[in-house]
Image: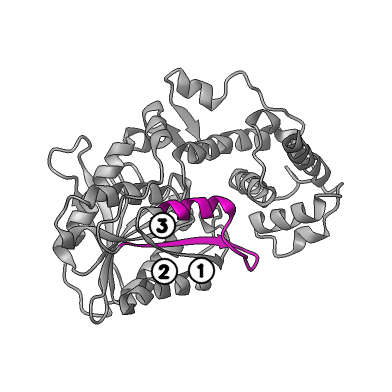
Amino acid sequence: MTVTPDLLRVLDDALNLQGRALGFDAATPLLGALPELDSMAVLALITGLEAHFGIAFSDDDLNGAVFATVGSLSELVEQALAGQGT
Amino acid sequence: MNAGPGAGLPQAFFLPAAPGSRATGQRFCLFHAPAGTPRGRVLYLHPFAEELNNSRRLVARQARALARAGYAVLQIDLLGCGDSAGAFEDALWSDWQADARLGLDWLAAHASGPVWLWGLRTGALLASDLATDTATRAPAEQATGLLLWQPVASGPQALQQFLRLHAASQWLGAGASASASGADTPAKRLERGEPVEIAGYTLTPALARGLQQARLVPPVASGARRLVWIDTALQPAAAPSPATERQLDAWRAAGWSVQARTVTAPAFWQQTGTDDAPDLIAATVSALSAGDAA
């Protein structure tokens, strides 16, 4: 099971992309490539992911690299979900 | 303040801080006079830092809609925020609590009807503080209604989000290849008693402490009390989240009559340039008015 479709929906909402994010794939670059992704939007994205997936990221897990692409962000969410199960 | 019924423009004025308060100077206020028969009074309490600016236009639009529906609405900029006196780093949480009381006192002297406290995000924390505070006032001056928009339930959570804003701006500056440096985080600097600069705001350890201690706590209702709780979502939303449900249960247990809704609207307090959310505005007016008829 991949979290990517749900993640794109959250991304689209958080950045108000009007459906554009739904066409993204794992290789789509985010931070630095998506003009809408300013610091408030990064925060909105983090908050949105936590609320949607019912997870809480540790500040230690959050850094610029995890927001590099859709794929790296999906990995972060999958790890957070896996961490809950243990 | 005088204004004919239906006056379109709010009255802008400066309200001097209450005599004897720690922080002096003027507070910027906007008063929206009610059209027609007055149905109640609403004091608006704004959110934290940049969220105030992001939400300003939509809040003004809502205030006008409430005024058209017969509510007297006062917006007050708290110490060091918006167009009020002082700098952000001068403010303590207790100053903001005092400013909220100041706004309510003004409203008590200039309008009539049931008192609603309307808080957005951390403004909800101030609203619940003030509702507790008014419990000792004369019955007509007690806050009998709370209107909470996307309320922050806990100060520590709001503080963590604000500190994350600092991290996010660093990632953007450094590019996607950089990783966070854990050596000198804003949280650690606050712990050492140093102020930190975040998104153009100087957050002092004292204000951070005040926010950290703030909680959304229902005052025990003496008499009829109404809570209108509105969350927003871009997708047509289902039921309130489990976290919201837990909060609502606490309010019901304290004797509040609870009306909770999720309306379709963007996260306007996090975005610049969102200045309309028709569903939110209509739902808010109808939620307040509905109770009057009951």
Query: Do the residues bearing badges 1 and 2 touch, measured as CB atoms within 8 Å?
Result: yes
Q: Residue at x 82, y 55 (%)?
A: A24
Cα distance in 3D space between marks 1 and 2:
8 Å
Q: Quadrant of the C terminus of chain B?
A: bottom left
Q: Which residue is mark 1?
A: B276
- Three-letter amino acid code of the residue under disc 2: Arg
Along the line of sight, which residue is nearer the eye, B189 or B263?
Answer: B263
Report in which chain the residue with disc 3 lies: B
Image point 41% across, 72% down: which residue? Answer: B287
Residue at mark 1: chain: B
Of marks 1 and 2, which one's residue comes earlier in the chain? Answer: 2
Q: Residue at x 29, y 72 (%)?
A: B71
What secondary structure is found at the residue carrying circle 1? loop
State the separation of the CA atoms marked 3 and 2.
30 Å
Any magenta on residue B227? yes
> Is there one chain holding both mark 3 and mark 2?
yes
Residue at 27%, 79% (x, y): give it.
B35
- What is the three-letter code of the residue carrying label 1? Asp
Q: Quadrant of residue B21?
A: top left
Classed neighbour count for the residue bearing mark 3: other residues with Cα under 10 Å, few (<14), some (14–19), many (≥20) = some
B208 left or right of B266 in image: left
Q: Which residue is mark 2?
A: B61
